[in-house]
Amino acid sequence: MENKILTVCPYCGSGCQLYLLVENGQVVGAEPADGRTNEGNLCLKGHYGWDFLNDPQLLTSRLRKPMIRKEGVLQEVSWEEAIGFTAEKLTAIKEKYGPDAIMGTGSARGPGNEANYVMQKFMRAAIGTNNIDHCARVCHGPSVAGLTYSLGDGAMSNSIPEIEDTDLLLIFGYNAAVTHPIVARRIVKAKQKGATLIVADPRKTESARIADTWLPLKGGTNMALVNAFGHVLVTEELYDKDYVSNFVQGFDEYKANVEKYTPEYAESITGVRAADIRKVMRQYAKSDKAMILYGMGVCQFAQAVDVVKGLASLALLTGHFGRESVGIGPVRGQNNVQGSCDMGALPNVFPGYQSVEDAKIRKKFEKAWGTTLPDKTGYRLTEVPHLILKENKIKAYYIFGEDPVQSDPNAAELREALDQLELVIVQDIFMNKTALHADVILPATSWGEHDGVYSSADRGFQRIRKAIDPPGKVKPDWQIISEVSTAMGYPMAYKNSEEIWDEMRKLCPSFAGASYSKMEALGGVQWPCPSEDHPGTPYLYEGNRFTTPSGKGQLFACEWRAPLEQPDADYPLTLSTVREVGHYSVRTMTGNCRALSQLSDEPGNIQISLEDAAEHGIADGQLVQVYSRRGQIMARAQVSGRIKKGATYMTYHFWIGACNELTVDYLDPVSKTPEFKYCAIRLEAISDQAQAEASIRKQYAELRKQMLVGAVPE
Amino acid sequence: MNHASSNSLVIAEAAKCIGCKACELACFAVHNRDNGVGTAVGTVTMPVLPRLYVIRTDSFTMPVQCRQCENAPCAGACPVQAIRQQDGVIAIDAEACIGCKACALACPFGAISLYKAYSGGAELPQPLLQERRDSKLQRKTRITAYKCDLCRNTEIPGGSAAGGDAGGRGASAAAAQDRNPYPACVAVCPEKALQLVEVGTGSSRSLNREGVIF
């Protein structure tokens, strides 16, 4: 008997709906469903990315029972013992060092919104700290900060389906073909429908390949280009004067700031032709409907928030807001990174983006949660290693559904920091690199094994549903956190995820109307949705009313700053981290899907220009050594004419070719997002390829052996 | 020329392809049911062996596959007549193939590959030759030529997917019905970059600027 369960894909933020086909309690396939964003299409991850539920133990193994480290070794224990141990340790640390010595994470992946709500409630109400953050910090943190400043809401102002009906698309540092194939479909359709396509990217991505104008800027020069865009709009009087005087503030400072960024000056920094800068801005300003999409190529720089504000300013100057198919879209990478931000898994806001520093809001939450709540912003995820190693401020770290050792910069420093902590709690579905440093492991249910809600990149709440029973003795995330909280003396008990959702809705005005039954009826609800009778909001800022304190859009420009680690004689090339279409993030899921791992496996690729490859004597497909000031790894060379001389790009999903051994932990001053897209490296050809291949196989085997802790013997 | 007997073919539009390789996986899946792959690609233990190849050069990206040439040079090059015109496609008889590579060399599109043969998910040894592997003599695995067969002789997945309770525009039900007669790569492509072209169905066809056939 085959069952079909409607749910949402667990990979990227596109929010594609799919059916899981279940036979005898096992998932045997996936079929596209008619979701708002995907309309009966899936990419290869949606089609083939569910296999990890069958736990084939390719890369790592499923966690099935709680574990505690005893005498240096992780040993299986009962739930009772694991919860008791965790609560006791946390309580002792809280009493000895204060609540701010404990850090927690949210999870932007499988657990869903309810688990994130419970986690931030636990950190704030039970522990008594705002030290909660999650991987949005290392991706779209700058979007949340920048767009909140400029427009009021740190999310896409538009919807994914609107992309195909715009007249002009400006794509900035965003490679949709690899990161969101189902959003790329809308870009392709927009082009087919006659839209002008402009792509600013140092690499010739698939979007750049079909673009009308490709602006191949040098890595790390975003702000100079965006300022030059603004300069053209202002000096050629292409901006919408009425719109600016009615709905926008800060024009005079903006004008002064972009004054020196003539296209010719920008050309000297970015390498983009001045004539192209003028041409694309004339097109952008004159298009009735124009839309900006951007991604990690904007956010993963130490100057990221500024660029986000600068891009938003272009749309403000030209009045591209408050209608369909206009606006600005930070296309969120992870399936629920929008959701974990929505739910307040951030150090400065409660659920619904309500500030922890606002006494009135705090009072509302204190009343609902029956306790006093901390009033100062907590630590940010990327500051954690420094706070542990240099300032000795954090003693315990509750890591929930993340793998920072694989995904965060400067892996060596992070490992050292984890080992210095008194308590590391890892709550996950798979053994991973971070779990190797854990004192307690709490095994949770995976996507496909629990109910909940995900938020798609375009603010769309959609239901995920349980398709199969979980293995072993695992429990849903929200239940585990509730039990720890109860053991610590702050009781939490929920019957199901809907009960959690309803509690959250009562506290968040902009989510209040998005009930489970409404999601069921409409297939999904886009926030803001303030009341039961509200249908949801496909695009924001209707009537050009922005949600900033003044109700007006804020213009912003500032000086361009070069990335911090520049290439030199010792490390002559630049490295940027990128993604690969068939894999996802830290690969604990896709790496355990047999088809996807067959299509592309360790050690991952480093893309090199034809010129640099020739100079180093490196052939396509060969293994090479890559060095930075922080570490060294091996990777497979992918020699391509799409890459500019002097620049290299590495896929960050891989475990042996883990490029975060190399990356630098310089942070954006506002959002504290690391500069993944720029550091200096050196390449070396390897003469004995056979030995290198053997060494990769050996490393991989050793790594897998480490990951089979507590695995069911094959 | 009698159009009615022309072979159909699958072609791709570079203007739509994003290089995601969903077509390669779908192709591999439907052709390896008896190797435990099936729609599920669930318990696959073999490498992904597609019959079309996503090619990325500096200036274009698109899958390339067999054109089902009417005067197939591969068939002319085959010394054992393993390649024949059969039910509207140029078909390779894997049983008869000797792995001589002549067809792959003769193909002007690079659309034929030689892969290891699998049966029941395991490599299929051939009776004659042996080779030294892991320091002992073992029978060498059979290697044969593979290319696109328009999914003839395969059961297309998703044929049973019609209906469902998606509601809305019914696109998935329509897509499922669409999927039925089509080759797997065409059905799976999220960008609709691939299509099955049936030559000589009586309607005159012309190309627009993007290379889309009307």
Image: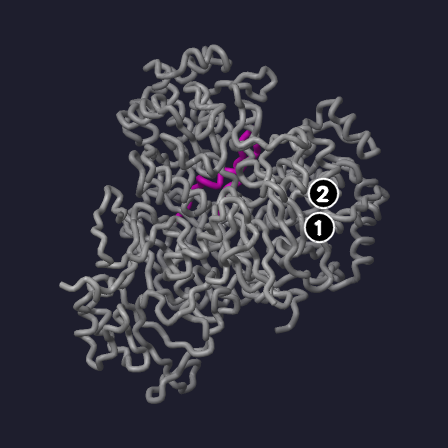
Can residue A92 be seen at all in this image of the molecule?
no
Label 1: chain? Answer: A
Quarter of the picture containing the N terminus of chain A is: bottom right
Residue B56 vs residue A321: left or right? left
Q: Which residue is located at x 84 percent, y 33 percent?
A: A370
Which residue is label 2 attached to?
Answer: A119
Q: Percent from the top left, x then y, of residue A404? A: 59, 48
Considering depth in this image, is B11 or A714 the residue closer to the camera?
B11
| Residue B103 visible within the image | yes
Q: Are marks 1 and 2 in contact (CB under 8 Å)?
A: yes
- Would residue A20 be counted in the magenta stretch? no
Considering the whole magenta stretch, tell me its main secondary structure. loop
Q: Which residue is mark 1?
A: A477
**SS under mark 1:** helix
Placement of B197 over or under A453, stated as above or below: below
Q: Position of residue B24 (x, y in %)?
A: 38, 60
Q: Residue furthest front?
A: B202
